[in-house]
Image (cartoon, rainbow, N blue to C red):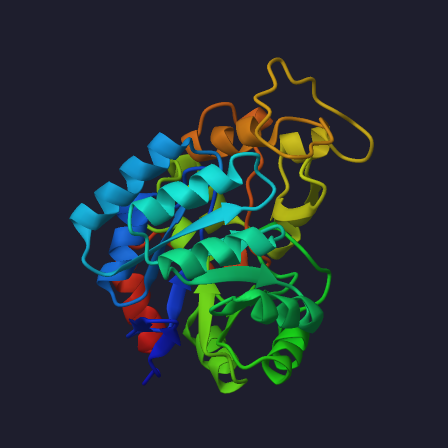
Amino acid sequence: MKLKELKIGKLKVPVPIIQGGMAVRISTAPLAAAVANEGGIGVIAGTGMSPDELRQEIRLAREMSSGIIGVNIMFAVRKFADLVQTAIDEGIDLVISGAGFSRDMFAWGKESDVPIVPIVSSARLAVLAEKLGAAAVVAEGKEAGGHLGTDRPMKEILPEVKAAIRIPVIAAGGIVDGQDLKEVLEMGADGVQMGTCFAASVESNASDEFKELYVKAKKEDVVLIDSPVGMVGRGLRNDFQRLIEGDKTVEIEKCRGCLKKCSKKYCIINALNNACKGGDAARAVVFAGEQVEKIKEILPVRMIFQNLLNA
């Protein structure tokens, strides 16, 4: 498959694939560097990290790759500004923001000449982002794993966003294999963001138990999960998901105050850490995309790219 170069601000991306920034600590330096080495954009998930941790991950990724490295930081986290500034100070190539955005972050990007790329779920938000100074947007649909901003499919959102703005539009949600990639690019996307296939890669920081859940998952295992962030998330059915269904809550022993607003339904950072580390599976939230059943084996990033481009 011959792919067109993706341009985001001053960046020229040979392969128009952005690896999703999957928190907590699933998308770390080894995964980001491996994707960057294949010509895509490797992304470190800064959410759930301290500024010092993020700084070390960026430096490690730079040691492992000379390619394009970005960070993804949820606007909902209390340390959003500190994390973004840390990334900028470390010379990050671009910043992706999910779960909202602010006028300030575009000003930071302009001052430092770092492209700011928000995740949006409607043409209205895309237009606002462009006016504020976004270098590109990620148009994400309901098929994505993790926190969702819409219940509409990506293939409805993408054409509306493309028609509304002039900056590059990266499609996200439900893109797992080469056929998905080809179809979305033919719809007019300038690039794609893919998370699920990279979460199950060899270089992913997720535990072996986490990756095996992806390989074994069936379509009926994918469910919506309430999150204290105030958004629903898409993930896999498990004991913890059943524990927090409806109005049920799980006591938080020690609140870290990591979010600007939190329902206190349960500790999302602990639940995501448990999934990543493969520790207390009974208290883990396992985020996954709607088409996770397409993942049949755990592969190195290089082979994932080969399969995508040879489809």
Q: Quarter of the image for the C terminus: give it.
A: bottom left
Residue sitting farthest toward the right: 247
**Residue 76, image x, y percentages:** 61, 42
Q: Can the viewer see residue 249?
A: yes
Q: Can the viewer see residue 296?
A: no
In this rendering, the answer to whether 186 lies above or below 157 is below
**Residue 295, image x, y percentages:** 45, 57
In this rendering, the answer to whether 279 lies above or below 143 is above
**Residue 269, image x, y percentages:** 55, 30
Instruction: Using residue 294 as the reference point, say whether residue 75 is left or right of it.
Output: right
Q: Quarter of the image for the N terminus: give it.
A: bottom left
Instruction: Using residue 78 as the reference point, say whether residue 12 is left or right of it.
Output: left
Residue at 50% x, 77% y: name it: 167
Instruction: Using residue 307 as the reference point, say whether residue 75 is left or right of it.
Output: right
Residue sitting farthest toward the top: 253
Q: Quadrant of residue 194?
A: bottom left
Residue at 52% x, 84% y: name it: 188
In this rendering, the answer to whether 233 lies above or below 267 is below
Between 79 and 71, which is closer to the camera in this rendering?
79
Residue sitting farthest toward the front: 111
Between 272 and 162, which is closer to the camera in this rendering?
162
Between 159 and 134, which is closer to the camera in this rendering?
134
Give the tally of numbered discs.
Answer: 0
**Residue 156, image x, y percentages:** 68, 76
